[in-house]
Image: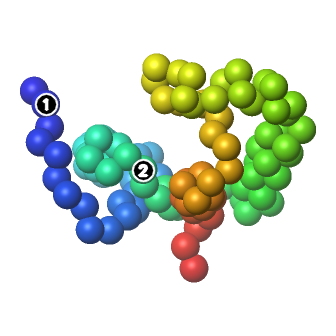
Amino acid sequence: MADTPHPFTSLPILPLSAALDPATKLQFLQDLRSALLNVGFLYLSETGLPEDLVQDVIKECRGFFERLPLREKERIEMKNEKSFLGWSRVSVIFLFCFGLVYALFKEPG
């Protein structure tokens, strides 16, 4: 049975801690599914990840793509993929998406 898409008015925020608690796990999974199917992205809070680790991951990801030769990036460019997954040239949309990815790893406040 397919879900009927629902318009969203705010960024879904899901606490990862709810996935670890048997009392809230089912609701977390339902909310996760809804966010991914109806919105396409979400903010994952209460990850328990140390801020130093988050910053290291961001630094490594950024460094990887800065060092990767343009020819290799173009080989995996999104426009060449049926799934539309892959590398994309820097653009307003890319910068927006990068900000969202960063937000997934950073705790609010």
Q: Earlier in the sequence, mark 1 or mark 2?
A: 1
Determine crowd level at label 1: few under 14, some 14-19, many 20+ residues with C-alpha closer than 10 A.
Answer: few
From the top left corner, tell me how far across and down residue 109 is, in percent: 57, 79
Q: Nearer the viewer, residue 50 or 85?
A: 85
Under mark 2, the amino acid is Phe
State whether residue 100 is above or below residue 81. Answer: below
Under mark 1, the amino acid is Ala
Q: Could you tell me which residue is drawn at 81 percent across and 25 percent down? A: 71
Q: Nearer the viewer, residue 94 or 55?
A: 94
From the top left corner, tell me how far across and down residue 29 is, in percent: 31, 42
Q: Nearer the viewer, residue 65 or 25?
A: 65
Q: Could you tell me which residue is drawn at 83 percent across and 38 percent down? A: 64
Q: Is residue 53 left or right of residue 103?
A: right
- For the question of whether residue 53 can be seen, the reply is no
Residues tagged 1 and 2 counted as in contact (Cβ below 8 A)? no
Residue identified by numbered label 2: 41
Calculate the distance from the C-alpha at mark 1 to the C-alpha at mark 2. Answer: 19 Å
Q: Nearer the viewer, residue 67 or 105?
A: 67
Q: Secondary structure at mark 1?
A: loop
Residue identified by numbered label 1: 2
Q: Is residue 103 left or right of residue 22?
A: right
Q: Could you tell me which residue is drawn at 70 percent across and 21 percent down? A: 75
State whether residue 70 is above or below residue 15. Answer: above
- Label at residue 61: none
Q: Secondary structure at mark 2?
A: loop
In this picture the colour scheme is rainbow
Q: Is residue 12 left or right of residue 86?
A: left
Q: Give the quadrant of the N terminus.
A: top left
State whether residue 82 is above or below residue 85. Answer: above
